[in-house]
Amino acid sequence: MEIISADLAIVGGGTAGCMASYEAKKQGIDAIIIEKARVRRSGCLAPGVNAIYSYLHEGESPENYYEFVKFQGMGLARRDLALSMIKETPYAVGILENHGLPVLHERQGRFGMRIYGEHIKPILADIAIESAENIIERAYSFDLAVEGSRVYGVYVFDLKNQDVFFVKAKAVLIATGGASGLYRNYTVPWYPQSNAGTGYALAIRAGAEIEGFEFRFIPPRIKDVNSPIGVTAVGFRAPLVNAEGEEFMKSGYQEFGGETAPIAIRAFAPSREYLEGRFPVYINTESITEEQKEKLIKLYLNAWPMFYLFIHARGIDFAEKMLEVMPCEPYISGSHTVAGIWIYENRMTSVDGLLAAGDAAGGVPLKHVGGALAEGIIAARTASQIKGENGFKPEERYPEFGDYSWRDAEERMQFVLDHYAGGVSRYYIYNEHSARIALNEIMNLQSLRLDGKAVRVLETCDRLAVARTMLEHMIERKETRMPPFQMRSDYPKLSSSNYILVSRFDGQKHSFRRDYV
Amino acid sequence: MIVFDYDLCIKCGKCEKICPCLAIEMIDFPKLAYPDKCWHCCACIKECPSNAIKLRLPPHIGDQRYEMLVLDRQNTMVFQIFFSGRMIDEMSIQVRK
Ligand SMILES: Cc1cc2nc3c(=O)[nH]c(=O)nc-3n(C[C@H](O)[C@H](O)[C@H](O)COP(=O)(O)OP(=O)(O)OC[C@H]3O[C@@H](n4cnc5c(N)ncnc54)[C@H](O)[C@@H]3O)c2cc1C
Ligand code: SF4
Ligand code: SF4
């Protein structure tokens, strides 16, 4: 087995991973990026973005940002992580601007920076190419080497030649994003299928602590095309209306902030309108001018180009035919909830030498591009402090393949989660009994050895590992804390408890509570 | 869903390599081997040197006669909408300083 050595092994050449390689070079350490696809267009940023959210504008303080995300997270947010993260965002965006990203220096919402971001990923790739010692693409990280409570490297399956190699490193950074493709989807997923929750699965198998996995992310989106809605709702102050013409956010959710309520409530409210029969739900764009319309389409071309095709094929004229809104299937992602790998302020996980950043890491309910960039930077600085030799001798490893079709396993998983673990078809509701049925079935699927194209088999195994931990968390939280992200029919009353649910798996499951401080 | 025009395709393999979701496979010609893994991100369309790939909506979303092409022109990206093969609209955006 080939062994490659580096100071820092970065798993995932996405937003956080590319930025980490820049800072690693600046701090004088060698970094290797291991990427399953191609860094130039991989992960969340492949189509682009039109604003960098979680950006600290002049005149705002980090404390203001913390208060903002705490409100967005319905009281649940880690202060240490939020403060340390937001401080780095002007530095991070400055690096992108220096490399050619058009930054407009205009606000998009309170903590957003408008950009022309179609090319943000190719620009990040340029940064990674000039910074990283080595970038290995089409390579899937499938296991960590952990002994005692320290990480020594990562086992990688080369999708090009089906070989396994080992990257030996003083520090390993998990930057694989969140998990898409767990639940059955009704249309094109919003979160990229490329992000199969690998980083979570690596951490779970390595016995690292996981936090907040009971909080799934369910985004309210433009129905069918599943495009982000924020630019329309916030940027153009377009309100949500139901089939009866009622602006239900204003009439029913004033106590949560009405039209600007936390994102969970903005997903919960339309899903109630569906459940109670007052659909379709629209985002009212009637008052948008011709000039604004062109601006809006261009914003989407920067971020979700299918939208342009959608409005033509469906004959949508904003003035007459309003856009429909519907929340989609749940994901696990640290970008919009506190779900993720537990990290300390320096972005170290509970395993020595193992770092996490971006959507893979938990604790801050609104992280976005700004947060992922910042966490990549902080993690690289921490990595540069790790000294000492790594004399670890890796063993021969090969992923296990078998004869059960990955496709059949995946389809069963998505169906079971949809029906028993609060998917779209159940209006996101679950209970103890239903979640246990799902957990049993996921564990059955985990006992199968899967067959098919290597990347698909590895992804399915990772998704199953994530699904299992998610279900264990969902069962463990015996209350409804954040509808619809976490919402139970056997404990329907909205709770305002304030603890973090943390779990760890070392052959046996352990779970415990920590306070938000 | 993406559709290939095999008369234009020069079999360079760039679309397969760029796809973030590893949904395309090259066996002689490129093919959308895993349609349900396609994120509709247009990365392959932007990368194709011979404009051989277009985007269509998944059939349950809308009219299959509409297609989108994206042309990478260095500092701008040009998006074109086609109806039954005829271009009916075009928009472009700046992508680099
Ligand atoms: C459609 C969409 C629109 C968004 N819009 C905005 C917006 O307008 N503004 C904003 O600020 N934020 C936005 N976000 C959120 C933001 O994009 C993400 O929070 C952020 O980019 C996540 O960065 P990351 O580094 O954690 O993950 P990513 O950038 O997704 O990187 C993860 C990387 O890991 C790789 N990988 C995965 N598994 C493996 C493996 N096994 N081995 C090797 N590599 C692997 C992936 O290929 C990918 O390159 C949006 C997200 C989406 C999905
Ligand atoms: S549109 Fe995106 S996800 Fe679909 S095949 Fe092309 S590159 Fe892959
Ligand atoms: S990138 Fe275009 S020309 Fe090259 S193989 Fe793909 S479709 Fe054919």
Image (tube, grey):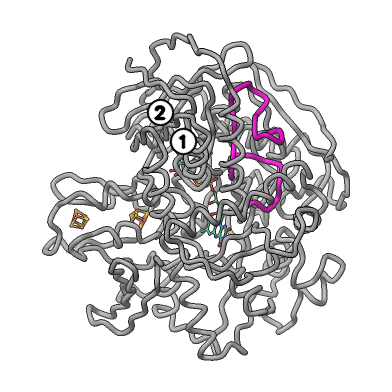
Discs 2, 1 touching: Cβ within 8 Å: yes
Q: Chain of mark 2?
A: A
Crowdedness near tag 1: few (<14), some (14–19) or many (≥20) residues, C-alpha within 10 Å: many
Left or right: A507 in relation to A20: right
Q: Amino acid at mark 2?
A: Leu
Query: Which residue is tagged 2?
Result: A450
Q: Nearer the viewer, residue A379 or A349?
A: A379
Left or right: A299 in relation to B50: right
Query: Which residue is tagged 1?
Result: A460
Q: Residue at x 30, y 62 (%)?
A: B46
Q: Secondary structure at mark 1?
A: helix
Q: Against A164, is A96 above or below?
A: below
> In the image, which is nearer the foreground, mark 2 or mark 1?
1
Q: At which x and y percent is residue A325?
A: 60, 71
Asked whether A369 falls inside the magenta stretch, the response is no
Q: At which x and y percent is residue A99?
A: 43, 56
- Magenta stretch in the rendered image: A342-368
Q: Residue at x 71, y 28 (%)?
A: A503
Q: Secondary structure at mark 2?
A: strand
| Label 2 CB sits under 8 Å from any ligand 1 atom | no
Q: CA distance from mark 2 to mark 1?
A: 8 Å
Q: Against B40, is A313 above or below?
A: below
Ligand 3 is found in the corner quadrant, namely bottom left
Q: At which x and y percent is residue A201?
A: 55, 31
Q: Residue at x 68, y 33 (%)?
A: A342
Crowdedness near tag 2: few (<14), some (14–19) or many (≥20) residues, C-alpha within 10 Å: many
Q: Nearer the viewer, residue A124 or A45?
A: A124
Residue A228 sits in quarter: bottom right
| Label 1 CB sits under 8 Å from any ligand 1 atom | no
